[in-house]
Image: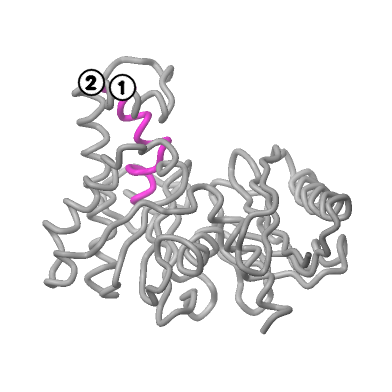
Amino acid sequence: MNAHLGIDIGGSAIKIGVIDAEGHILLSDRMPIDLTSREATVGCIVACVQKLTDWCGRAGHKPLSVGVGSPGTIDRHTGMVQPPTPNVTTIIGVDFVDVVTRATGLPTAVDNDANCAAWAEHRYGAGRGIDNLICMTVGSGIGSGFIVDGRIFSGSSGAGGELGHVSIDHDGPRCGCGNRGCLELYTSTTAIVRAANDASGANGKRTIADLFDSARRGDSGANEVIEQRAAMLGIGLVNAINLFDPEAAIIGGGIAEVDSDGRFVRAVAKSIHALAFSESGKHLPVAKAALGNDAGFIGAASLGASLVTA
């Protein structure tokens, strides 16, 4: 069977997988990432690709392409990771197309990780059949991907669609990107847990999964923090919705894995519907990502596949 390999680089791990031509997952796994130096991080990526090609060989699949989803801005002309990339600084200046092609000899595509997730949801997930959507990935950082007229929107240089670094408080704390009050500082899973721990005096002991478990068990304090931060994410999204007028918004990333009863997504939707300018915005469908944390590597692999199936 023909196969397409996908790599999704994160700040705490690398998600990897293999899909077939229809987007079905043949293999998925998580690998550690070493952020001590550029050489160490690139070595992790090469090891991931080698693991996938080795698995394909044992399983009798023929790898045809590779796709890489990377944090940060991907220069659309050179394919190189551009600054700022505040959460994974060791990949700045890396040309993943060159790195992976040298390692495998396979055609390789690279795009921003949130763009990859948005593409996957558009092709195979909650946004299937929807040509204009926003997909937010809420994890240790905030990513956003825009699908416009059935295509990934990346702007003139590749830096378009970075909602995580839209300021919602110009007097807020300084972000790693250099701005103040970025949406990411308030609505990432890291920020949500920090706010909950500060409110409860938990001293950093709770995780995002613990927080959502507490909310489901009736902890009003935990639920209040979740609803407050979801409303703030809605504020950020409304700015894009009022400009872009999408058909749907999709919430994915690590938050989708722990939001089993949908309380976070419902709170985001409530905020959007209360604040949106247009009637379409006030009734915009807001859905949890169907592909979960697999969306990044699925989308990356699908972009790679487009190099050999176009």
Query: Does 56 appear in magenta?
Result: no
Q: Amino acid at mark 2?
A: Asp
Q: Residue at x 69, y 61 (%)?
A: 93
Marker disc for residue 214 = 1
Q: Amino acid at mark 1?
A: Ser
The residue carrying mark 2 is 219
Do the residues bearing badges 1 and 2 touch, measured as CB atoms within 8 Å? yes
Residues shaded magenta? 183-199
Q: For the residue labelled by badge 2, is the local secondary structure a helix, a strand or a loop?
A: loop
State left or right for residue 83 relative to residue 219. Answer: right
Q: Residues within 10 Å of mark 2 (few under 14, many from 20)?
A: few
Image position of 115 with respect to 200: above or below? below
Q: How far is disc 1 from disc 2 in space, using C-alphas?
A: 5 Å
Q: Main secondary structure of the magenta part?
A: helix
Give x and y (percent) for residue 173: 34, 42
Based on the displayed image, in which of its 4 quarters is residue 19 positioned? bottom right
State the quadrant of the C terminus: bottom right
